[in-house]
Amino acid sequence: KSIQRVVNSARNYHYENTLAWDHDGADMLPSRHYVTYMSKMSDYKNEFQKEVDEFIDNYPELLTSVMNDLSSLYNSEDYPTQNKLRDKVVMDSRVTPIPESADFRVDLPAKESQKLKDELDARLVDANQAAEKDLYMRLYTTLAKAVVVLKTPDKIFRNSLVLNIIELANK
């Protein structure tokens, strides 16, 4: 549970600070937020590693408990060794530049090369539009909540209502 808590926090932080970009799970990070983002993700990775180390240190006792609970149903082959488990539990992030169609360095006939560049340009336009739409939807959702609160006389106005809008505007 403690490992999952760190993973969820890191994932939420990532989603709050990036924009959807690529179908393969890559997201766009505004360059002005790079240092802050990487520092925070480093903190999450350190916390994650601490929790993983603690879990793996306790793993033999946990296996003993499982063995006692399962009795004759226990099969040691169902459970990885501590070393194999450590290799499976990893938190990683990668930063790559956004490609440009001018980056094609392949020896292709001019017609094919231009076709590939045109296709990449179209995909980059689509990805940019998707990222902008994601940002607009976040803004719309945040402002829609503010409108509901401000229109309802019985609702309690909290500073977080304005702070959420300011935080989103700074992204």
Image (tube, rainbow, N blue to C red):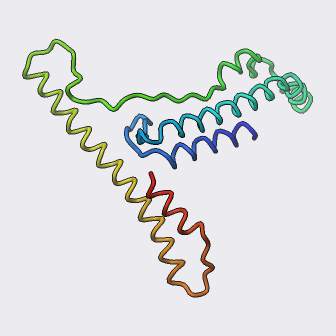
Q: Which residue is depicted at the point 43% across and 39% down?
A: 27
The mark tally for this picture is: 0
- Observer-nearest of 46 and 148: 46
Hey, which quadrant is residue 121 in on the image? top left
Q: Please, is residue 71 above or below residue 13 in the view?
A: above
Hey, which quadrant is residue 4 in on the image? top right
Q: Which residue is depicted at the point 11% across and 26% down?
A: 114
User: Which residue is the extreme one toward the top?
Assistant: 107
User: Which residue is the extreme one toward the bottom?
Assistant: 153
Hey, which quadrant is residue 84 in on the image? top right
- Observer-nearest of 26 and 162: 162
Q: Please, is residue 38 above or below residue 156 in the view?
A: above
Q: Is residue 116 left or right of residue 137?
A: left
Q: Is residue 139 left or right of residue 149?
A: left
- Observer-nearest of 73 and 97: 97
Q: Where is residue 72 in the image (x, y as percent from the top left)?
A: 88, 25
Q: Which residue is depicted at the point 25% across and 30% down?
A: 100
- Where's the N terminus, which quadrant? top right
Q: Position of residue 169 (x, y in %)?
A: 44, 58
Q: Please, is residue 32 above or below residue 73 in the view?
A: below
User: Which residue is the extreme one toward the right?
Assistant: 68
Q: Which residue is depicted at the point 44% across and 51% down?
A: 171
User: Which residue is the extreme one toward the left?
Assistant: 111
Q: Position of residue 66 (x, y in %)?
A: 86, 30
Q: Position of residue 152 (x, y in %)?
A: 54, 84
